[in-house]
Image (cartoon, grey):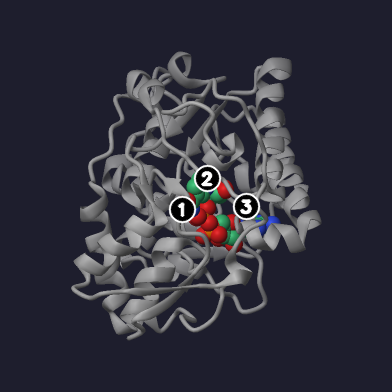
Amino acid sequence: MSSSPTTPSSATAATPPAAAASPASPASPAGAPGSAPVAVTGAEGFIGSHLVETLVTAGHRVRAMVQYNSFSSFGWLETLPADVLDHVEVVLGDVRDPGSVNGLVAGVDAVYHLAALIAIPYSYRAPHSYVETNITGTLNLLEAVRHQEIPRLVHTSTSETYGTAQTVPITEDHPINTQSPYAASKAGGDRLADSYHASFATPVVTLRPFNTFGPRQSMRAVIPTVIGQVAAGQRTITLGDLRPTRDFSYVKDTAAAFLAVGTAPAEQVVGHTFNAGTGGEISVGELVRLIGKLMDTTIEVHEDAQRIRPADSEVMRLVCDASRLRAATGWAPAHTLEDGLGHTIDFFRDPANLARYKTDLYNV
Ligand SMILES: NC(=O)c1ccc[n+]([C@@H]2O[C@H](COP(=O)([O-])OP(=O)(O)OC[C@H]3O[C@@H](n4cnc5c(N)ncnc54)[C@H](O)[C@@H]3O)[C@@H](O)[C@H]2O)c1
């Protein structure tokens, strides 16, 4: 892993993987493994760190933006195996800063833009920061990609932009109904992405993942909250509303969906939005029972008032129709919910991993 504080062009490029030794031919689709790296924002985060692994395994060199911090922490990237990190160049920066973003995308084949503030409860407290990161940050990516004529930008949306399902399963034509400042800020970024494609033919594709889970997820999300508390020895765990249903994808499947839209021929994906999800549905209450069964224990749930969202802000039902993504790219989930939960439980049962979490706190 090489690193550069601000200017990637001055950093030593990591050795390309064997599969990337020959330059991309002019006929190669955008984002195909080639001589130029691909850039990832939010690379040190949960989905971003898995996507970095997926990209390197597919033969890419990755320029990974990690949000600048004075601890020189590279987040979850620090836990990746050395044979992955050999192909990763870390760039410290901030998507709110146009200079950072311009440097990040210089000379890359494709950009995967995942950086965002994502916690819904914190978006009630600090909405300005959500607008700056999720809307202005996305605008900075769009401007950089437009002016530097980067062949592909994969923009990350979220199923939260649909709000409570009005029809199921949810297709991309379902109305947008933003029930939290987080969802509104993500939808703002989506609208900018659509407008840049319409106005400037910027080659942007939007991936809209439904709830994603797996190793390295923060304890702001329900699955790590349950598994983490049980792994830490608690049998009575605190949660919010148990009624909402979600469509949970294992993180490796979500990372594969990013790769699919990042590398598909332009005419199949550019200018479009794609849902990514399994089509399955489970309530939070049923999920807790399933995790208890897989962890061989009975979990008692204590409902914590501070974790309950305002009634009109809670998204009660999300179920994905991913047939557009499947038709355009052939993507399909490879993991069942039980299978993914098994990997996640193994991760949280490892004391070294558990020690990275604060299981006794309400992690906003
Ligand atoms: N986790 C899910 O279930 C889910 C579902 C749908 C969509 N998404 C989207 O996927 C993306 C990744 O989410 P995640 O779950 O991995 O969350 P995460 O919080 O682990 O990752 C987000 C990353 O963005 C980085 N970041 C935040 N502000 C930044 C800034 N100003 N400059 C640069 N980097 C910044 C953070 O440091 C973090 O590493 C987000 O865009 C999110 O909206 C997530």
Please report whichever mark, 3 or 2, sits nearer to the chain's N-terminal start: 3
Q: Image quadrant of ligand 1?
A: bottom right
Query: Image quadrant of residue 349?
Result: bottom left
Query: Can see residue 227?
Result: yes
x 65%, y 52%: residue = 311
Q: Is mark 3 within 8 Å of ligand 1?
A: yes
The numbered disc on residue 243 is 1
Instruction: Inspect the image, locate mark 1, and give the three-letter code of the amino acid beneath it.
Output: Arg
Which residue occupies the foreground of this view, 342 or 59? 342
Instruction: Inspect the image, locate mark 2, and give the three-letter code of the amino acid beneath it.
Output: Met
Residue at the spot of label 2: 316
Instruction: Inspect the image, locate mark 3, and give the three-letter code of the amino acid beneath it.
Output: Ala
Residue at the spot of label 3: 116
- Quick one: label 1, few (<14), some, or many (20+) residues within 10 Å? few
Which residue occupies the foreground of this view, 56 or 17? 56
> Quick check: marks 3 and 2 in contact, CB under 8 Å?
no
- Provide the secondary structure element on which disc 2 rests: loop
- Quick one: label 3, few (<14), some, or many (20+) residues within 10 Å? many
Return the x and y of residue 36 as percentages of the image width and height: 47, 39
x 36%, y 51%: residue = 251
Which residue occupies the foreground of this view, 355 or 174? 174
The numbered disc on residue 126 is none
Is 305 left or right of 328, judged from the image as shown?
right
Please say if 231 is above or below 21.
Answer: below
- Provide the secondary structure element on which disc 1 rests: loop
CA distance separating discs 1 and 2: 7 Å
